[in-house]
Image (spheres, helix red, strand yellow):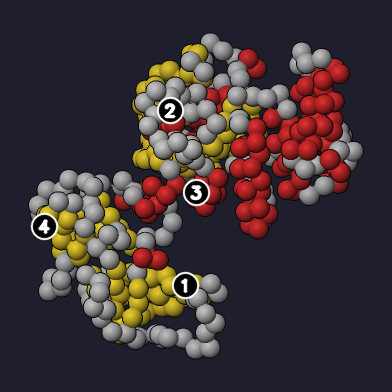
Amino acid sequence: MPHEGIFAPWDDPDAVPLIRFRNVTKRFGDFTAIDDLTLDIYEREFFALLGPSGCGKTTMMRMLAGFETPTEGVIEIGGRDMARVPPNQRPVNMMFQSYALFPHLSVYDNIAFGLKRSDMPKDQIADRVAEMLRLTRLEKFAKRKPHMISGGQRQRVALARSLAKAPKLLLLDEPLGALDKKLREETQFELMDIQEKTGTTFVIVTHDQEEAMTVATRVAVMDAGRIEQVDTPPAIYEGPKTVYVADFIGDVNLIEGTATKTGEHAYDVAYAAGRDPIKVSECMAEVADGSAVTFAIRPEKLLVTRERPEDRPNALEGTIIDIGYLGNLSTYHVELPGGQMVKATMTNASRISRRDFTWEDKVWVSFRASAGVVLTE
């Protein structure tokens, strides 16, 4: 059972998923878009389908909405097989990247549009629209047409319209793709706030890893119609299960080597002749002695110093090849003997009038034994 107060129904054996994909395959002719996929998504989750173009995430969403039919397998929503349920009878609404607002209708009438065509009593429609305007902070813009408001406000109108009929499930297809970077970041937190207040299950499709990591309770990282890993953002970032996931999420250094077991969960990874092996202390995977592995470590886990530090079990000597100053961070590309390049990111905690290091400097790149992960696939 999850700790009381922590939202983690996926860790609760008694929790019943809202959405179930069971051995779902979708083919378009000879092309397999989704390959034998099984997945559970729980009520009140903000779930992200993340992957590059063509990985199958939009196909999954379209099957949930009823716009595509699985070639094989079963999709259930709320315990009901969706095979024969048409899109307009599913407890689902979908918000498209283009927002698809009616340009000739006001913000108020755009939000009210679906309600007026439902069986909701007319006297309740005004109250529901007012509630949606409050939720999305659009009260002042109710009488304006879409072209009279900003992109971020149009995005909130589309969200309000999608939530007006109180669907159990809202599907969001790249909903922030049309916004500039700063507005996109602000809107991510607004989305999280609205999702929490309404309690609606959100499933978002995105190729933007930062977006998925920011908004989602869990992320499914997809590749070629398969799910590589489903986990919480911290677990995916700190504990990727495959090289693909490690490489797709954030920056990472990947060092190929050979593993030798030295204790429970502890391994040495030999990566270059004549060099000390990398010591790893918290490897959860079972790795056979002599196996080819990839050691993955995030740039921010690395420390760059002139002298070899005494308190770190791993220290690799190298030469600074490139430096990037990003304001809050400095990035160092360090070449190890043998040509392996590693990237280290260090916070600029105080103002600097000169760099501590410069190009061609000999330095030590060091890290703790628990800082990286050993991957076998």
Tell which of 79 and 152 is nearer to you: 79
For the residues carrying marks 3 and 4, which lies nearer the camera in this image? Answer: 4
Lower sequence index among marks 2 and 3 = 2
Q: Is residue 54 visible?
A: no
Dot 4 falls on a residue whose secondary structure is strand
Lower sequence index among marks 2 and 4 = 2
Tell which of 363 and 199 is nearer to you: 199
Q: How far apart are the alpha carbons under marks 1 and 3? A: 21 Å
Q: Which residue is mark 2?
A: 40
Lower sequence index among marks 1 and 3 = 3
Tag 1 near tag 3, CB within 8 Å: no
Dot 3 falls on a residue whose secondary structure is helix
The amino acid on which the numbered mark 3 sits, given as a three-letter code, is: Met
Q: Which residue is mark 4?
A: 262
In the rendered view, would you say 302 is above or below 90? below
Q: Label 1: how many residues lie within 10 Å, few (<14), some (14-19) or many (20+)?
A: few
The amino acid on which the numbered mark 2 sits, given as a three-letter code, is: Asp
Tell which of 265 and 269 is nearer to you: 265
In the rendered view, would you say 211 is above or below 314? above
Q: Label 3: how many residues lie within 10 Å, few (<14), some (14-19) or many (20+)?
A: many
Tag 2 near tag 3, CB within 8 Å: no
At 86% across and 43% down in the image, what residue appears? 140
Q: Which residue is mark 1?
A: 347
At 86% across and 38% down in the image, what residue appears? 142
Q: How far apart are the alpha carbons under marks 3 and 4? A: 34 Å
